[in-house]
Image (cartoon, rainbow, N blue to C red):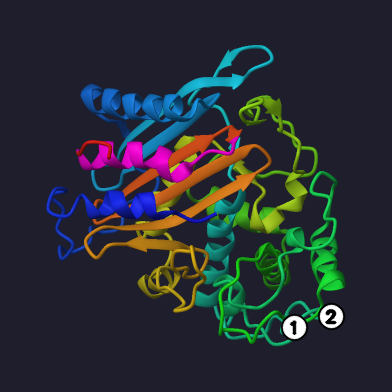
Amino acid sequence: MVLRRVIAALLLTTVGACGGDSESDPPEPADPSDVWEAVEPAEADKYQAALEAARVEQDLPGLAGAIAHRDSRQLWVGATGLSNLTTPTAWLPTDESRIGSVTKTFTAAVIMQLSEEGLSLDDPIEAWVPGWYAGPTLRHLLSHTSGIVSYNGVGSFDKSRAWTPEELVQWAYDNEPNLRFTPGTQYEYSNTNFVLLGMVIEKVTAQSYSDAVRTRLFEPLTLAMRVAASGDDSPTMVRAYTCPTHTDASFVEDPSSGWAAGAIACTPTDLSRWIVALYGGELLSDASLAAMKTPSGVTSPGNEPYGLGTIIESDGDLTLVGHSGGIGGYQTFAYYLEPHNTAVILMSNCVPTNLDSASAHLLAAVLGIPYP
């Protein structure tokens, strides 16, 4: 769920080599309805070669990727390998994949929109979703500092069955009703946090979570995304596998087991446009975006700093903000590279995939440096 040291190592090799000016004024917000143009053919070839090298390096069934340059409104999207091993089918750039915990960036964005409309992030969760946990605030949930256990990490959780949001929270509570620590004092990643935030969205907006995300995010940005429901089996969805056995894992996890923490499905193109819109400042106020990208100040060994629904990796000159995710046999890397103002997307249909190593191929291509 988090970046490992290989990405930090790549960033450290780029100081002085990237040509970016971290002190330059940020560009004016762009119109999200702007037409995106394809990158130059030589640049496209470079990105495609990096994607193929990443797939071959780990012997993966397939990979898809996208690079979106916000300032020039230029986009590359590509795929390599197979989307289906049973009936060998090439992975097309227009195919969909499940993005797992990258969904948390959408949930966080809606909560931040609502905070701009009057919702307080310092409200305790029981003020909006009573009956379970007392003490943690919405801010604690957004930053994974609530102390609430992750429902999928306790008991004999069956991720393959259909779940309602209430059942997910009840499972967590039944297995561990007490907080693991005083809210705000420690970091522990928990999907329960974002299911509760999805329930807050429903209470505040009087819409279903799916409708709220659609009307507030997908439609205004013209994104053909969806919150996948239980049993979702779109014909454009790539198949997913466990490696190296290549056992089909497409339905190992029902989308409902992720809900507001992990159920969104989309193409690499739309995911890249989302990352640009969110972290490029086209969606939220400067204050809201800054809050999302500001580390909470607490983390755990092996975890990069976490803000509000956002992982942050920085060496002082270059910064990655975004999220990674996994559900079933699907894994996704979705980050924004600053100060280059570029979204870097990688989607794999195999678990395990070392996303850090694979994404480093694309990051090196963006920065114009050799892959380490």
Q: Amino acid at mark 2?
A: Gly
Location of the N terminus by quadrant is bottom right
Q: Is residue 81 above or below residue 172?
A: above
Q: Position of residue 34 (x, y in %)?
A: 34, 42
Of residues 317 and 107, the one nearer the viewer is 317
Main secondary-structure element of the magenta-colored stretch: helix
Residue 308 visible, this angle: yes
Image position of 209 with respect to 142: above or below: above
Residue drawn at x 78%, y 81% is: 178
Residue 353 magenta:
yes
Identity of the amino acid at label 1?
Glu
Q: Are marks 1 and 2 in contact (CB under 8 Å)?
A: yes
Q: Is residue 341 magenta?
A: no
Local secondary structure at mark 2: loop
x and y percentages locating residue 184 in the rendered image: 56, 84
* Quarter of the rendering occupied by the C terminus: top left
- Which quadrant would residue 215 be assigned to in this image? bottom right
Q: Earlier in the sequence, mark 1 or mark 2?
A: 1
Point out the stretch of residues depicted in magenta: 351-368
Q: Which residue is mark 2?
A: 131
Q: What label does residue 126 carry, if any? A: 1
Is residue 35 visible in the rendered image? The answer is no
Q: How packed is label 2: few (under 14 Cα within 10 Å), some, or many (20 or more)?
A: few
